[in-house]
Amino acid sequence: MAVPTRRTSKARKNKRRSSVWKIDAPTLVKCSNCGGYTVPHKVCKNCGSYNGKEVISMD
């Protein structure tokens, strides 16, 4: 059974783990109906439309 001869340093360990915890900014697209920014493939929170059709009435 292989056993590591030297202990992994804190800096080396943290360098390896650092890329896992990065969070990407969400992708935003302009709504075709109102022009507001929204997440793709979701109903627009400003006007309630999806794919150019009104899905939710925003009265």
Image (cartoon, grey):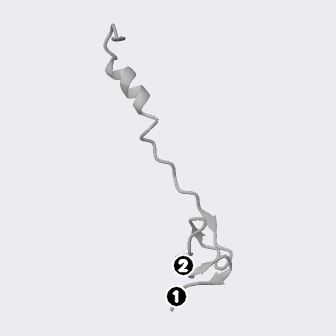
Where 57 sits versus 38, above or below?
below
Determine contact: label 1, label 2, CB under 8 Å: yes
Q: Nearer the viewer, residue 5 or 39?
A: 5
Question: Residue 39, image x and y in percent?
Answer: 56, 65
Please give the residue where the numbered disc 2 appears in the rendered image.
Answer: 46
Q: Is residue 50 left or right of residue 15?
A: right
Amino acid type at image mark 2: Asn
Residue at horizontal 40%, vertical 31%?
Answer: 17
Q: Quadrant of the N terminus?
A: top left
Please give the residue where the numbered disc 1 appears in the rendered image.
Answer: 58
Q: Residues within 10 Å of mark 1 (few under 14, many from 20)?
A: few
Residue at horizontal 42%, vertical 26%?
Answer: 15
Q: CA distance from mark 1 to mark 2?
A: 8 Å
Amino acid type at image mark 1: Met
Name which quarter of the figure residue 50 lies in.
bottom right
Question: Residue 14, image x and y in percent?
Answer: 37, 28
Q: Secondary structure at mark 2?
A: loop
Where 23 sits versus 46, above or below?
above
The image's mark for residue 25 is none
Name which quarter of the figure residue 37 lies in.
bottom right
Residue at horizontal 52%, vertical 88%?
Answer: 58
Q: Secondary structure at mark 1?
A: loop
Q: Residues within 10 Å of mark 2 (few under 14, many from 20)?
A: some
Question: Residue 42, image x and y in percent?
Answer: 56, 70
Question: Residue 6, image x and y in percent?
Answer: 33, 9
Q: Residue furthest top?
A: 5
Among the two numbered marks 1 and 2 on one chain, the one whose residue lies closer to the N terminus:
2
Residue at horizontal 34%, vertical 17%?
Answer: 8
Q: Is residue 52 left or right of residue 48?
A: right
Name which quarter of the figure residue 38 lies in.
bottom right
